Amino acid sequence: MSKLEINDLRVSVDTEDGPKEILKGVTLTINDGETHAIMGPNGSGKSTLAYSIAGHPKYTITGGTVTLDGDDVLAMTVDERARAGLFLAMQYPVEVPGVSVSNFLRTAKTAIDGEAPKLRTWVKDVNGVLEQLNLDPTFASRSVNEGFSGGEKKRHEIAQLELLDPKVAVLDETDSGLDIDALKIVSEGVNRFKADGDKGVLLITHYTRILRYIKPDFVHVFVDGRVAEEGGPELADQLESEGYDKYVKAAAAS
Ligand code: ADP
Ligand code: MG
Ligand code: MG
């Protein structure tokens, strides 16, 4: 059982001209087993939402609440959020020179579970996940994100997702920069994660193509820091043919 509730969330970012409001009241509930897609034009605040849920220090929460199973996520440290079962795939993952993928994953798993995973099953799990993501076993000994191709970064994110096995995953532009084969591999990883049936997924994307592989239950159109429209998967099809124009104009006029 897991439920991520975002209620009237308002977020500002500090700029040279002072604080600028980016999220202007976002309300969204992700129940367990549900996949929600957030779609919207560049600059609409999609990544701001992801970073705010993750607890990035650059973003100031000025109003509203985020709870996971009733617990106040916004009061938690970044580590506590991960331990509570939240996962954020970073849109621009950082390099961690000198730390191997294998150590990074094991450290993260240990931090989240509160105890180190049993070595034998862990190695088997890691190798299994890497293999399914079409990553060479030697990938585990490379430094995190150092010299990774765009596709390797995304597959590494999904390896984290599968191994850390959170309750709710927030995936920000997991599809960006992937060719069609890599997109399929990454999507299959997300679908394996979802297969438990009780996982919440918030899939943030600019393009509809990933939604051909990862089926959303709900689609939210994000414009100017707000949810401008909500619907089922058919809304993604409509966006595919019509674009965001209608919603951008309506938001500008209001
Ligand atoms: P999206 O992910 O939908 O493209 P973002 O959340 O990245 O949108 O950005 C939303 C808006 O907030 C944009 O206008 C962007 O320029 C602004 N913004 C985000 N982060 C910062 C920041 N650190 N400093 C200044 N402006 C920012
Ligand atoms: Mg973004
Ligand atoms: Mg699983």
Image: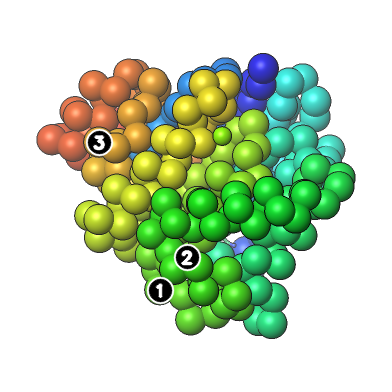
Quadrant holding the C terminus: top left
Image point 66% across, 81% down: which residue?
Answer: 97
Image point 18% across, 37% down: which residue?
Answer: 240
Q: Earlier in the sequence, mark 1 or mark 3?
A: 1
Is any atom of residue 231 visible in this view? yes
Q: Please give the label number shown on residue 149.
A: 1
- Work out how far the residue at label 1 is from the one at label 3, CA to CA, in angstroms: 24 Å
Is residue 183 shown left or right of residue 2?
left
Q: Which residue is mark 2?
A: 153
Q: Which residue is mark 3?
A: 212
Q: Secondary structure at mark 1?
A: loop
Is residue 204 shown left or right of residue 4?
left
Quadrant holding the N terminus: top right
- Work out how far the residue at label 1 is from the one at label 2, CA to CA, in angstroms: 6 Å
Q: Secondary structure at mark 2?
A: helix
Q: Secondary structure at mark 3?
A: helix
Dot 1 amino acid type: Ser
Dot 2 amino acid type: Lys
Tell me, yes or no, whether the two marked residues, 1 and 2, touch with CB atoms within 8 Å: yes
* Residue 166 percent coordinates (x, y): 65, 37
Is residue 38 shown left or right of residue 92?
left
Image point 72% across, 26% down: which residue?
Answer: 67
* Residue 32 percent coordinates (x, y): 57, 20
* Residue 182 percent coordinates (x, y): 31, 57
In the displayed orientation, state which residue is furthest to the front.
Answer: 120
How many labels sit on residues? Answer: 3
Q: Earlier in the sequence, mark 3 or mark 2?
A: 2
Is label 3 within 8 A of ligand 2 (CB to nearest ligand atom)? no
Dot 3 amino acid type: Arg
* Residue 134 percent coordinates (x, y): 38, 59
In the displayed orientation, state which residue is furthest to the left.
Answer: 241
Is residue 1 shown left or right of residue 118?
left
